[in-house]
Image: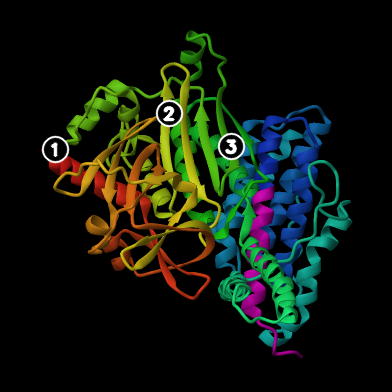
């Protein structure tokens, strides 16, 4: 008997592994819907369902084991139908998706020796009615689980090896030896690590970054021996590589997040009576794990919006000379320390006139500029839907998307062309743990500006004129740019020299920040600060610089908002 096994930890590993397997199953069912005579998705589903049943049995989750067994029965029937040239229809796909949803919902609540709920029993019966697709479904009930010892320590002691090997053993029995990538090559091995351990490593990497900076400063110190200089020159790049590798451990590929939206698009199309095809690209692009949850929620809203508001119904599309199946695209690409994610459709475009009317009703000042009008879709409470539905019409969604993206130090904008479609473009930092920043000096303090927002730096013109509120206008070859004396108006720093202007850009808008000096650029590790300090001073976070000095990271979107408010107040 081994009482030292952490049962709850084993359970959490099981839940995480099962969720990944369920996501794969969901994707396979959608593949089956697109190719209803293909056996390949069925074979993949059978392996995953068998593994889920085996793992649930090991943990004593009888309700999940019975559901997975019923799912296997349904798959056998659908496979038999396909072999008899009877394609899996939409009803079969819907029942299989309901089965995945039921297992996903039941896993966190499962307990050893539990029984199926009334709803689960009903779904199990529904899964077994798919015999109409081929040979009759086997009628025998799943074998009752073998009696287990009630000692938690004994049961847990017998399970670690089985739990870790059950997936591989089940796959081997079903004909699959190991996971492969899309091109048939063996997938790279992975190791599941607790996020808390990765975060601890990131904290250590930040300390290493500071030490590296101090070592680099020592290289220029007078009186350093040649031997010590050689050691330092060899050590500093190694520390840099170690820090970069640690930071990279938080990056995860966007593939699973993007693929999960296939279900979102499919369900939204079913709900609205439309036909939609979702095209995905950029699955290999990586992003910080801390961004995943909120990004997934934003994508869900945008994909639903594309189907509900963007894509026309099949009859309307035919009348416009378009194919009846609407196209929704979801793509990701890296761009200078950022990740650009786009959600587009080939629908009718935004109804700008309706948006203007809704904006006026909400008390928003409206101009005739179409691009500015399009951005009003992010206003809280604005909707152009004629009636309520499961996916649209309540005036919520896009405003929360914008707020969520901006809270992640990102931006979102929308572009629309009447009759051709709409495109939402999000820009997010690659990671929130580390960024490359431009160090500037204001009065006696150093601040960090995210370098991916910097467009150019120049000396402050002597003839630059300011308004009473500290703002002005700077003429550049690309046009007029508003400027702001950063020290006096935002940071409360008296005695600023205002010698340089840093032109930054965010969400298509530019602003010139007047600072005292440009110190240089360097990678910095982001440290969080209190929400009260952030909102009061337009500070996004803090960074420990190479010499140990704590520099504050400027919140450029917030500074832009405050500058626009100052200019609007001056105009009025």
As rendered, which of 208 and 549 lies closer to the eye?
Answer: 549
Q: Which residue is mark 2?
A: 415
As rendered, which of 4 and 287 lies closer to the eye?
Answer: 287
Badge 2 or badge 1: first in the primary sequence: 2
Horizontally, is 54 left or right of 480 in the view? right
Helix, strand or loop at disc 2?
A: strand
Q: Residue at x 81, y 68 (%)?
A: 165
How many numbered circles does the render carry? 3
Query: Of the numbered discs in the image, which one, if any, rests on residue 273?
Result: none
Q: CA distance from mark 2 to mark 1?
A: 29 Å
Magenta residues?
Answer: 1-24
Q: Looking at the image, can residue 343 be seen?
A: yes
Query: Of the numbered discs in the image, which one, if any, rests on residue 331?
Result: 3
Question: Where is the C terminus found, in terms of image quarters?
Answer: top left
Badge 2 or badge 3: first in the primary sequence: 3
Query: Of the numbered discs in the image, which one, if any, rests on residue 571?
Result: 1
Q: Residue at x 69, y 62 (%)?
A: 65
Q: On screen, 418 above or below 78?
A: above
Q: On screen, 515 above or below 191?
A: above
Helix, strand or loop at disc 3?
A: strand
Q: Residues within 10 Å of mark 2 (few under 14, many from 20)?
A: some
């Amino acid at each position: 008997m081994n009482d030292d096994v952490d049962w709850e930890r084993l359970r959490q590993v099981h839940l995480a592994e099962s969720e990944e397997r369920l996501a794969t199953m969901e994707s396979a069912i959608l593949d089956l819907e697109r190719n209803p005579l293909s056996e390949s998705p069925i074979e993949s589903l059978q392996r995953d369902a068998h593994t889920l049943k085996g793992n649930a049995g090991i943990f004593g989750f009888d309700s999940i084991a019975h559901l997975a067994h019923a799912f296997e029965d349904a798959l056998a029937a659908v496979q038999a139908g396909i072999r008899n040239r009877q394609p899996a229809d939409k009803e079969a796909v819907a029942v299989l998706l309901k089965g995945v949803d039921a297992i996903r919902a039941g896993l966190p609540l499962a307990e050893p020796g539990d029984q199926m709920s009334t709803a689960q029993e009903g779904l199990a019966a529904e899964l077994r009615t798919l015999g109409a697709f081929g040979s009759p479904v086997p009628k025998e009930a799943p074998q009752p689980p073998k009696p287990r010892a009630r000692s938690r320590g004994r049961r847990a002691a017998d399970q670690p090896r089985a739990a870790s090997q059950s997936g591989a053993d089940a796959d081997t029995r079903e004909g699959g030896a190991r996971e492969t990538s899309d091109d048939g090559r063996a997938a790279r091995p992975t190791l599941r690590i607790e996020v808390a351990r990765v975060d601890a490593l990131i904290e250590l990497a930040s300390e290493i970054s500071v030490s590296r900076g101090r070592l680099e400063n020592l290289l220029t110190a007078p009186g350093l021996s040649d031997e010590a200089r050689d050691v330092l020159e060899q050590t500093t790049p190694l520390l840099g590589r170690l820090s970069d590798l640690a930071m990279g451990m938080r990056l995860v590929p966007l593939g699973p997040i993007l693929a999960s939206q296939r279900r979102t698009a499919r369900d939204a199309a079913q709900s609205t009576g439309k036909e939609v095809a979702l095209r995905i690209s950029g699955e290999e692009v990586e992003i910080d794990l801390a961004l995943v949850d909120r990004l997934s929620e934003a994508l869900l809203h945008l994909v639903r919006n594309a189907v509900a508001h963007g894509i026309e119904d099949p009859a309307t599309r035919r009348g416009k000379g378009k194919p009846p199946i609407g196209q929704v695209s979801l793509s990701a690409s890296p761009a200078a320390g950022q990740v650009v994610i786009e959600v587009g459709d080939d629908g009718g475009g935004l109804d700008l006139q309706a948006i203007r009317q809704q904006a006026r009703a909400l008390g928003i000042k409206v101009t005739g500029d179409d691009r500015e009008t399009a951005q009003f879709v992010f206003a809280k409470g604005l909707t152009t839907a004629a009636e309520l539905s499961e996916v649209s019409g309540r005036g919520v969604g896009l405003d929360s998307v914008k707020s969520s993206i901006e809270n992640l130090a990102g931006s979102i904008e929308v572009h629309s062309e009447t009759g051709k479609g709409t495109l939402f473009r999000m820009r997010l930092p690659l990671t929130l743990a580390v960024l490359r920043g431009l160090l500037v000096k204001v009065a006696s303090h150093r601040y960090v500006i995210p370098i991916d927002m910097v467009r150019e730096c120049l000396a402050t013109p002597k003839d630059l004129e300011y308004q009473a509120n500290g703002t002005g206008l700077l003429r550049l070859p690309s046009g007029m740019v508003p400027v702001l004396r950063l020290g006096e108006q935002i940071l409360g720093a008296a005695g600023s020299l205002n010698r340089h202007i840093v032109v930054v850009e965010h969400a298509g808008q530019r602003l010139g920040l007047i600072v005292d000096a440009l110190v240089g650029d360097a990678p910095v590790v982001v440290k969080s600060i209190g929400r009260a300090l952030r909102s009061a001073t337009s500070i996004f976070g803090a960074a420990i610089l190479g010499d140990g000095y704590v520099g504050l990271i400027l919140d450029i979107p917030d500074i832009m908002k405050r500058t626009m408010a100052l200019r609007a107040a001056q105009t009025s």
